[in-house]
Image (cartoon, rainbow, N blue to C red):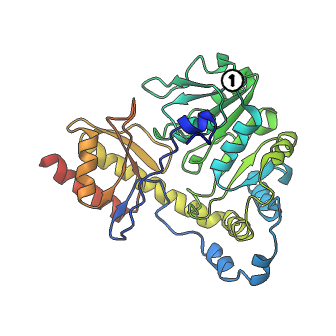
Amino acid sequence: MGYFRDNIEQVKGYEPGFQPKQTDVLKLNTNENPYPPSPAVMKVLAEINAEQLRRYPDPTGDEFRQAAAQVHGVSPDNIMCCNGGDELLTIALRAFCDEDRPAAYPVPTYSLYPVLANLQNCEVMELPFDSEFNLPPKLAAAGAALTIVCNPNAPSATFIGVDEMASLADELDGVLLIDEAYVDFAEDNCIRLVKDFDNVIILRSMSKGYSLAGLRFGYAIAQPPLIASLMKLKDSYNVDAVAVALAAAAIKDQKYFAENVEKVKKDRERLTEHLRELKFEVPAGYANFVLAKSKERKAGEIYDKLVERNIYVRYFDLPGLSDKLRITVGTSEQNDKLISALKEILSG
């Protein structure tokens, strides 16, 4: 067409996981929480009134910032609300990167990173994980303006220890964005690094542990000067009034949140055991999904056979991933249905 910038013409857009239209499917491909949001969220939703919709929302979402600050033991000035964690990634790349200021991250990882970097027309340095998904030793020396580490990593579900992440932050001259979208299902997190490092941004999402993927709400945690500057790049009203109210209700209900997370963790361990019994290689995982490699059949073939049975998992035809399947942890009943289907497929 010739209307777009060259990098826009050339970039391949992000491909979300398949969203089947029919309802009689088992959907384990996009890492949604299988359990519903807190009843407190549904109560607030039922009470949304016309005045809240008529008026513009609070531009900084202070109701949520105050609630999240209390949960995390930080100040509201440490928090910025975002239209999903993806908006924070966009803001960070716009803030720190351009043609002369590159971004770096280990691979394989969240496939949105290169898309956003290409839109920003910045150089990307992709450094490969080793076979156990340890941090690449040259990551700190890459000289990137922005280094992104997804932790727990998607799609491997592996976790880099907090001390190692602190060492990385200390070595970097640029900013370290730690994408903790899945950290609710891990045993530790990196929020405490914000107190020690002025170059660390933590990304959090309400999509996974809080069962609010349809709401599109995430947030940043960083030192106040960094947050204040990031605020310059967000849309004027980037989170709507309904989203702020519901996200605040969700994060206040820590009892319900903790109970749901524990259910997912138990289901994850049971699913992992069953997959290993079927001769899948499944590394220890710290997210609400597992990465499984069959010793018996090709991953693409298993994926197709599952689709025939209206069961959807995620298959990436990419280097380092084409022999694996990423499987969202469902309820016990959903996981049992998946395992039963896999037994049929592998015995056929």
Q: On the picture, is 32 further left or further right than 300?
A: right
Q: Residue furthest left?
A: 348
**Residue at 47% of width from left, 47% of height from top?**
15
Q: Secondary structure at mark 1?
A: loop
Q: What is the quadrant of the N terminus in the image?
A: top right
Q: Is residue 210 above or below residue 11?
A: below
Q: Is residue 127 above or below residue 309?
A: above
**Residue at 71% of width from left, 52% of height from top?**
219
Instruction: Tally the marks.
Output: 1
Q: Quick one: label 1, few (<14), some, or many (20+) residues within 10 Å?
A: many
Q: Quadrant of residue 126?
A: top right
Q: Is residue 261 above or below residue 177?
A: below
Where does residue 32 sit, x and y in percent of width and height? 49, 58
Q: Nearer the viewer, residue 142 or 346?
A: 142
Q: Is residue 109 above or below residue 170?
A: below
Q: Nearer the viewer, residue 226 or 73?
A: 226
Q: Which residue is mark 1?
A: 144
Q: Is residue 260 visible?
A: yes
Residue type pointed to by label 1: Ala
Q: Nearer the viewer, residue 48 or 276?
A: 48
**Residue at 78% of width from left, 60% of height from top?**
237
Q: Is residue 150 visible?
A: no
Where does residue 107 sit, x and y in percent of width and height? 51, 29
Where does residue 134 sit, x and y in percent of width and height? 51, 26
Where does residue 310 sit, x and y in percent of width and height? 28, 61
